[in-house]
Image: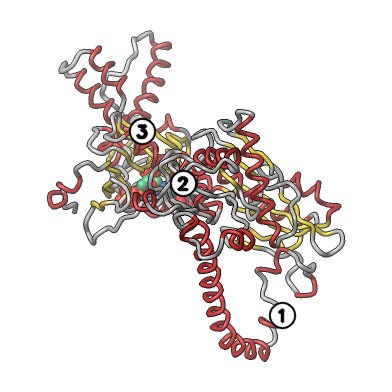
Amino acid sequence: MANFTSVDASLEGRLLFAVPKKGRLNQAALNLLEGADIQFKRENRLDIALVKNLPIALIFLPAADIPTFVGEGQVDLGITGWDQVQEHDAGVRALYRARRFSGEITPEEEVAHNGRGSGCETVLDLGFGGCKLQVQVPQNGIYQSPKDLVGKNIGTSFVHLARKYFANLELEADSANTQVGGQPAGFTGKLRTKIIELSGSVEAACALGVADGIVDLVESGETMKAAGLKAIDTVVESSAILIKSRGPSNPELVDLIATRIRGVITAQKYVLCQYNIKRSSLIEASKIAPGKRAPTVTTLDEEGWVAVSVMVEKKRLAPIMDELSKIGAHDILALHSTVGRAYPPYTPKSLPSHSIMSNTTPTPSRTIDGEVRWQSKIYKAIVTPIHFVTFLLSLYLIDSHYRAQRYRQHASGANNQNERPWLHRLLYQQRLSPYDWVDDHQKPSSSQSTNATHRHEAKTRYAGGGPRSAKEASGPWFYRTKMDAFMIHFVLTPEAGAVQIPAILRGEQSPPSGSAIGSKDYSKRPVAVILGGGYDDAGIDIIMEASKGIKPIPWLDPTQPAPPLGPKYGKAMVARIKELLAQLDKDGKMDEEKVHWY
Ligand SMILES: Nc1ncnc2c1ncn2[C@@H]1O[C@H](COP(=O)(O)OP(=O)(O)OP(=O)(O)O)[C@@H](O)[C@H]1O
Ligand SMILES: O=P(O)(O)OC[C@H]1O[C@H](OP(=O)(O)OP(=O)(O)O)[C@H](O)[C@@H]1O
């Protein structure tokens, strides 16, 4: 039972969000909340949970009651089934119709109330909880069509929708009779069909002689079949939806949640399918799985073979994998859902060298040869700590080297420099780095003026730069040479990007994050999304789809030929990014939602 009084005060200022407390929609709704980074801890038996990272309180309610709470405006937002919203709507209409019949309200007042509907507005379809509310009768019984059930007993949990359905049937039957007998027809509010309200196990009603037919939900059809029933009509097709009240307390927060959930749904809808195939079959394979834009193709070391990554709708994955294997695709792998198939069945020899599976498939020495495995354990036990310590040491050395260099170069002018100026210049070639923050009250010298001013402008625009604290602003002349001054936020996976990037583009000040990299300064919105080489078209599509229409911004895609990975790679890519951004800025294209290659 809900303990509302004890948490009353803490609900103050929070958006109330109703979530199904049990049943078919419960787990999927909780998964969505987790994906949207809505963090909460639900105490045992308490039906209210305060969200830790947003001003939201979750209210756990039966799915059937959620439309009532949202419709009445006591709760701002809710997840429930479309069928439940329809049932609530039919109930509200029935109530006003009854009041009109009793003379309590006028026909005009009834129309006005109906115009306002149930008070619930659909925000978005959540893509799960798909089912149909169907009229069902005994498989071998005497009823063949819905009209055979007029005047009979109907068992259901959806009494209002069932009443509406049979009222229409009766009206149809009566008007047919009118045409024959010449009597006036019209629904009088008295239903001849008897609707019997049942709260569960509705399918048992016919066998037990309680009802002649039922109106109940069907998904797989297993329950119906097991109860010896068959469907003869569909009343409503349903899936889970996000609904909001007419006047939510915080419309911006409602939009934010909707955007995050939309991102999660997009990411859930697709999987990344990877496979190896002969280049000669590539065109045929692209017809089977064209991806959202185009498949990403990588040449393998084995002559004539390529590795392909492509985004595939999850529900079409199995037939697509079958089709691909038919035309000779090998090592088909679906990422993010851990579903995989290898054609032909895996043997170490059958793998093309350096194929996409080589990263994920254990090497023979690790999986087949027990002795080697034993040796490698000892080897690992000795070498891993050495690697770890060496890694930490090298980080320390790099950091202290650059820290010392920054101090030497910039500590309150030349007086504080340890070396003589000529030696300093010789050693460090003092010049601004691409990511420098140039202090506002410390104007660049005339020899640096054009570049530095340009850089200063670029910095302010592209990175939202400047001192991070008052101490830093009043401190010694300080250069920030680390990438995080330029990069606000770093995204690790397409799924994370589908949630995090839309949040940042919307201007959220504390968007969800899975990485410590980046300045995390969200006070200015970013001006570009720079896609790294680790994302292929499929991954990029997932993020872009979720971010569509939020803020027009250039998306920089590293699809041009690049130098091989190595010391030159980073520098070259950064130079290209900067060059492209400057060009887009010059051409006035920074406000267009477009992909540009760099
Ligand atoms: N078999 C099903 N398959 C998919 N979705 C379903 C199915 N049954 C119900 N639903 C959806 O889930 C919603 C909640 O139904 P469910 O029976 O799980 O609720 P509940 O709160 O547990 O109620 P009850 O106690 O009556 O079972 C339904 O309104 C419908 O939208
Ligand atoms: O077509 P199927 O996949 O078999 O699903 C249909 C069943 O699911 C729902 O009941 P639920 O299991 O939620 O329990 P209930 O009968 O107590 O409502 C519905 O009322 C059906 O009985």
Colour mode?
Answer: secondary structure
Q: Is residue 172 above or below residue 314?
A: above
For residue 456, side relative to residue 115 (left or right) = right
Instruction: Kindly tell me whether mark 3's CB lies below 8 Å from ligand 1.
Output: no
Of marks 2 and 3, which one's residue comes earlier in the chain? 3
Q: Residues within 10 Å of mark 2 (few under 14, many from 20)?
A: some
For discs 1 and 3, the disc positioned in front in the rendered view: 1
Q: Position of residue 30 (x, y in %)?
A: 38, 53
Residue at position x 62%, y 35% in the image: 594
Circle 3 residue: 86
- The reply to whether residue 574 is in sight is yes
Tell me the amino acid under the disc marked 2. Answer: Phe
Q: Position of residue 285 (x, y in %)?
A: 77, 49
Of marks 1 and 2, which one's residue comes earlier in the chain? 2
Residue at position x 34%, y 10% in the image: 183
Outermost left residue: 5
Q: Position of residue 326 (x, y in %)?
A: 78, 56
Circle 2 residue: 128
Tell me the amino acid under the disc marked 3. Answer: Gln
